[in-house]
Image: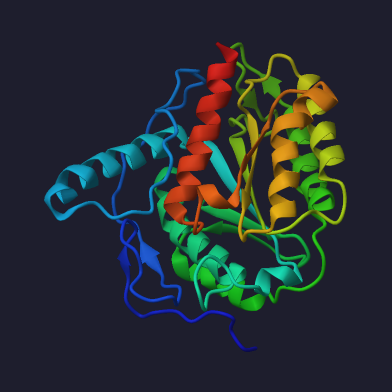
Amino acid sequence: MLSLFSKSSSDFPLTTEPESDAPKRRSFLSVFPRAGPSCSTDAPPPYDEISGTKPLPKKISRRSSKRQTSMENDLETLRRYDTVILVDDSLSMTMRGSKRGVTRWQEAGTALADLAPVAQKYDSDGIDIHFLNDPRSETSLKTSDDVWRVFDRVIPDGFTPTGDRLHQLLNPYITKLARARIQPDGTPIDRETGKEIKRMNLIVITDGVASDDPKTSIIHAAKRLMAMPDLCLVQLGIQFVQIGNDAKATKALQILDDELQEAGHIRDIVDTTPYHKLHPVTARGLVKVLAGAINRRIDAQK
């Protein structure tokens, strides 16, 4: 099968921009200290907008230090979460992405290939990747090569059944929560294994308007969570990240973010990041928006 990707044999730091339009693999080499389990609702660092500009030469050291500290803080926030990715593999993902000569599909693959080694620093399980159309589900991906192998086997085609796939991913997880023993601090414990059920961050990377109704699936999931009042309120979060500049997709995602909670009388579990906030989509950007969404939900509880 012909690969959709053109990969470089050299790696470069996550904080630098590639020299060409072709997507390259990057690595994140810093190892962060692990934190013990806690259901504390202390707010993590506030979400900062991601800047695509390079620091001036005289300020490289200071800015690099601040950037490193910010990333460490964000990763600490995400330690208790499983990272689950739902990738749009519809035909429109073959269109041009943020840079000339790079498709949206390649842009998503590059970001996730960079995210995997970062994520395994705070989540030993790695990341899970699912697709809207392709039935395969790849779990515990920990390296960039793991992600590239998955993306090389999937060919974008078809429509955007976001709602149906959300239901397929969320329903088993929420059923597991419903059967769990909830501790006084809101932590769910699996009755069979005696282990904590980790919180879930579900990232949906998509470029277009859904061809079905994701609102129904989200409302159904949120109402099931509301039926478990003792459960920690930050147990589940859904983050929609737009790739590509489709104005209709931007509007549809904004409706999910702004109107879904009121329309369904549900707990707010959805955040959206439009195209102009992450241009292009990167691993660092994904970490920032995830930590920022958690921060906002924690603030809402106070």
Give left or right: position of 76 versus 129. left
The quarter of the image holding the C terminus is top right
Q: Is residue 4 above or below residue 234?
A: below
- For image coordinates 51% across by 41% down, the residue present is 289
Give left or right: position of 250 versus 56. right
| Residue 72 screen position, x and y as percent | 33, 39
- For image coordinates 82% across by 48% down, the residue present is 163
- For image coordinates 62% across by 33% down, the residue present is 197
| Residue 60 screen position, x and y as percent | 18, 50
Q: Visible in this render: residue 246?
A: yes
Q: Nearer the viewer, residue 182 or 143?
A: 143
Q: Is residue 302 above or below residue 233?
A: above
Q: Visible in this render: residue 124?
A: no
Give left or right: position of 216 versus 154. right
Q: Quadrant of residue 192?
A: top right
The quarter of the image holding the N terminus is bottom right
Q: Nearer the viewer, residue 56 or 280?
A: 56
| Residue 24 screen position, x and y as percent | 41, 72
